[in-house]
Image (cartoon, rainbow, N blue to C red):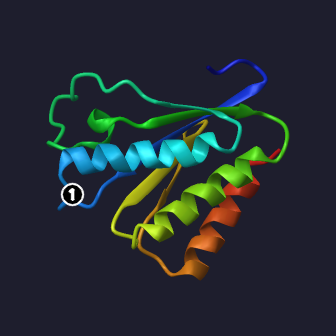
Amino acid sequence: MGTEDERVVLLVVEPDPDVDPDSADRLARRLRTEVAQLDVDARLAAAGPSPEGAKVGDPVALGAVLVALSASGGVFPLLVETVRDWLARQAARHRVSLTVDGDTITLEKATAAERRALVDAYVQRHSG
């Protein structure tokens, strides 16, 4: 994962604090399944030992999703749109962070218009 012709995106699902770890893991797996339908290489990141100071249910400890996609083409905007739509269907109780080349966007509770403006600006920065 991550050749010269690929861009790697890290998706981290930060579940609602009231969600138990098993449910949080299912959330990440459902998102991965939806992302994989975009014809990208999407894998659950290995959940290693929690970093010192990490809370129980820390999103990295539960597993993040690594996505490799072609550096050219229009898959990146579709990926971001898929994440935004997935989050909207979750009643906005959770947050999802996307990181590309050290630049992170976090989608959480916001109006549809606010999310759209934020996503459009982020996609524009990384589509080209």
Give the answer, above or below, for where 25 lies relative to 20. above
| Residue 64, x across and y down, in percent | 41, 37
Give the answer, above or below, for where 111 lies relative to 40. below
| Residue 11, x across and y down, in percent | 49, 43
Tell me the SS state at disc 1: loop
Residue at 26% in and 50% down: 23
Is residue 116 found left or right of 61 in the rendered image? Answer: right
| Residue 78, x across and y down, in percent | 71, 53
Find residue 41 and report its image quarter: top right
Residue at 59% in and 45% down: 35
Residue at 49% in and 70% down: 88
The C terminus lies in which quarter of the figure? top right
Mark 1: which amino acid? Val
Is residue 42 found left or right of 21 in the rendered image? Answer: right
Is residue 127 found left or right of 96 in the rendered image? Answer: right
Find residue 25 and report its image quarter: top left
The N terminus lies in which quarter of the figure? top right
**Residue on which disc 1 sits:** 19
Is residue 87 or residue 55 the one in the foreground?
A: 87
| Residue 13, x across and y down, in percent | 39, 49
Residue at 60% in and 40% down: 36
Give the answer, above or below, for where 29 lies relative to 27. above
